[in-house]
Image: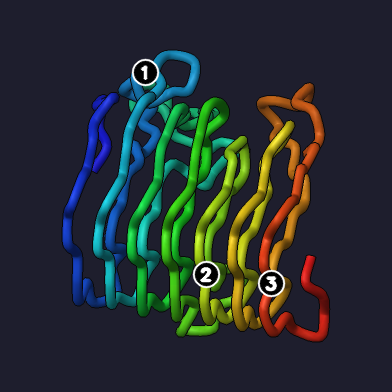
Amino acid sequence: TGGWAHHITVDGLKVGNAGMDNGIYWKRDVSYADPLTWSSNFRSTGNHFVNMWITRGGGEGAYIGDTDSNGEIVTSTWSGQDTLIYPIFVDSTVISNNYVNLWGWDGLQLSGGRLGNEIYGNTVSDVGLDGEESQKCGILAGGNTRANVYNNTIINATGNGIELFGFGSMSVSGNTITNSGEASIFANSYPTSENLTDPLQQLIITNNQINNPPLDGAI
């Protein structure tokens, strides 16, 4: 879902056996005919996804925000011309105290959250089971995102335990990461074409417990 909602709370929901779909899916697709789907006109802020049990499916445990951080080419319904439009942001998102288990792709993903985002207290285990490249991490703070990621437990992600692709200052602390198939913590700055002036990542990585890291590196 998504639409023009903001300041919603999803609390205590149980999602299971989702087939090939995602457990939680929260975004708004860009539409040329609807200016409220453009980042310049609307932000879906203050959404909380907490205390959920999300287990068994072929997609992602939680897909929150839009991963097309460099925008989407959309054809005008009037002129027929192609236009580059950037999707709405999902600022001040909280993803906390969720249990996520047995997913084919990533466990928890937040993208397009530029300000005030927190990912904490989650337990994510046995994700990325399909082995799909770039779709097998435990917790992902994706493009155009700034988030603090702390006090999470991640076990048996077939890819990276935590991935950080956003910008600016972010804290990664107090996490326990066990048996990641690739790096336990992986970070890289990806400036977006809409926000080329964003600062590069400034990561504060402290007090994380990393168990049985892979040969290609813990961090």
Residue tagged 1: 35
Residue 22, given in percent of the width and then of the height, sits at 31, 63
Give above or below for 192 relative to 105. Answer: above
Cα distance in 3D space between marks 2 and 1: 39 Å
The foreground one among 61 and 82 is 61
The foreground one among 182 and 19 is 182
Crowd class of label 3 (few under 14; some 14 to 19; many from 20; radius 10 Å): some
Residue tagged 3: 210
Q: Residue at x 65, y 50 (%)?
A: 173
The quarter holding residue 75 reads: top left
Give above or below for 165 relative to 168. Answer: below
User: Mark 2 or mark 3: which is in front?
Assistant: 3
Give above or below for 81 relative to 126. Answer: above
| Helix, strand or loop at mark 1 | helix
Kind of residue sitting beneath label 1: Pro
Cα distance in 3D space between marks 3 and 1: 45 Å
User: Mark 3 or mark 1: which is in front?
Assistant: 3
Instruction: Please state, as top left, top right, bottom left or bottom right, where the C terminus lies in the image.
Output: bottom right
Is 155 situated left or right of 79 in this image? right
Coloring scheme used: rainbow
Q: Residue at x 39, y 65 (%)?
A: 60
Residue tagged 2: 154
Q: Residue at x 50, y 34 (%)?
A: 117
The foreground one among 52 and 151 is 151
Mark found first going from the N terminus, 2 or 1 = 1
Is 83 situated left or right of 5 in this image? right
The quarter holding residue 35 reads: top left
User: Mark 2 or mark 1: which is in front?
Assistant: 2
